[in-house]
Image (spheres, helix red, strand yellow):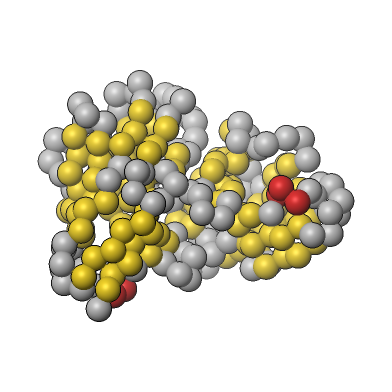
């Protein structure tokens, strides 16, 4: 079974500053995906960024980037130029390669961490 | 539709009653998932459908929980004889296909279930 650990229950950052959210995971799988989801006060779940485990290059999406360390099983999220709208819960999530590969049968279920509550301070 | 739609948004029920939660996925999405999110926690997987076939129900906590997707589109999660511990946000998610390029799950707004 996979586990995802987010060791920072709460964090805060000044507007326009940079913040890094930590995530570690435990798995025996060699092929998988990692995700960061954002849950604002509206309680939506919004995909922020995705990383394929077979890719060495860290994923980036505008102000969001990850530091993926496969050997260390670490997957941190860096938010640059923090904005008030970034205030939210952030969940790290793991998805293993389904049985039969990505084109085969099996569910793409996500295993989530407990989340980090990020507050951006004006 | 434009997004994953869940109904009702809020449901308060008395202990022992049955409840049915509905999910209408994004049109054309093959895969459908149900998750449960307790307050202060991340979502936990309940069950997965590929079209109308329930291919994984390993996350359903006990036999009071069941789900169906008879025509491969709308899905219903049913909880029988509800208990207070069932109180949580129930989220539905859908994705286009099982292909590696389509691992993005789109989540609905959820149904907040409160058992009193």
- The image shows residue A21 at horizontal and vertical percentages of 27, 51
Q: Residue at x 56, y 48 (%)?
A: B35
Frontmost residue, A51 versus B39: B39
Q: In which quarter of the image is residue A103?
A: top left
Visible in this render: residue B30?
Answer: no
Q: In which quarter of the image is residue B67?
A: top right
Above-or-below relation of B21 to A70: below
Q: Quadrant of residue B25?
A: bottom right
Frontmost residue, B26 versus B79: B79
> Which quadrant would the C terminus of chain A be assigned to in this image?
bottom left
Frontmost residue, B99 versus B22: B22
Q: Residue at x 60, y 36 (%)?
A: B59
Residue furthest to the top? A28
Q: Residue at x 84, y 54 (%)?
A: B15
Q: Residue at x 38, y 64 (%)?
A: A88
Above-or-below relation of A111 to B83: above
Residue furthest to the left? A57
Q: In this view, does B57 lie to the left or right of B94?
A: right
Above-or-below relation of A89 to A15: above
Residue furthest to the bottom? A122
Visible in this render: residue A119?
Answer: yes
Q: Is residue B13 left or right of residue B5?
A: right
């Amino acid at each position: 079974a996979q586990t995802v650990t987010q060791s920072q229950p709460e964090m805060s950052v000044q507007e326009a500053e940079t913040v890094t959210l930590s995530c570690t995971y435990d798995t025996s799988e060699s092929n998988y995906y990692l995700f960061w989801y954002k849950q604002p006060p509206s309680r939506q779940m919004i995909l922020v960024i995705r990383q394929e485990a077979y890719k060495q290059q860290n994923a980036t999406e505008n102000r969001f980037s990850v530091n993926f360390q496969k050997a260390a099983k670490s997957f941190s999220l860096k938010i640059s130029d923090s904005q008030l709208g970034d205030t939210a819960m952030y969940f790290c999530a793991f998805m293993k390669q389904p049985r039969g590969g990505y084109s085969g049968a099996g569910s793409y279920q996500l295993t989530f961490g407990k989340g980090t509550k990020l507050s951006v301070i004006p | 539709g434009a997004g994953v739609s869940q109904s009702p948004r809020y449901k308060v029920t008395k202990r022992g009653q049955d409840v049915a939660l509905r999910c209408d996925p994004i049109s054309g999405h093959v895969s459908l998932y149900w998750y449960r999110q307790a307050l202060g926690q991340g979502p936990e997987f309940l069950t997965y459908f590929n079209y109308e076939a329930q291919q994984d129900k390993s996350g359903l906590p006990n036999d009071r929980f069941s789900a169906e997707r008879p025509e491969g589109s709308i899905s219903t999660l049913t909880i029988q004889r509800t208990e207070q511990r069932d109180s949580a946000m129930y989220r539905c998610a859908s994705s286009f296909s099982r292909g590696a390029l389509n691992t993005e799950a789109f989540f609905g707004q959820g149904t907040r279930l409160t058992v009193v």
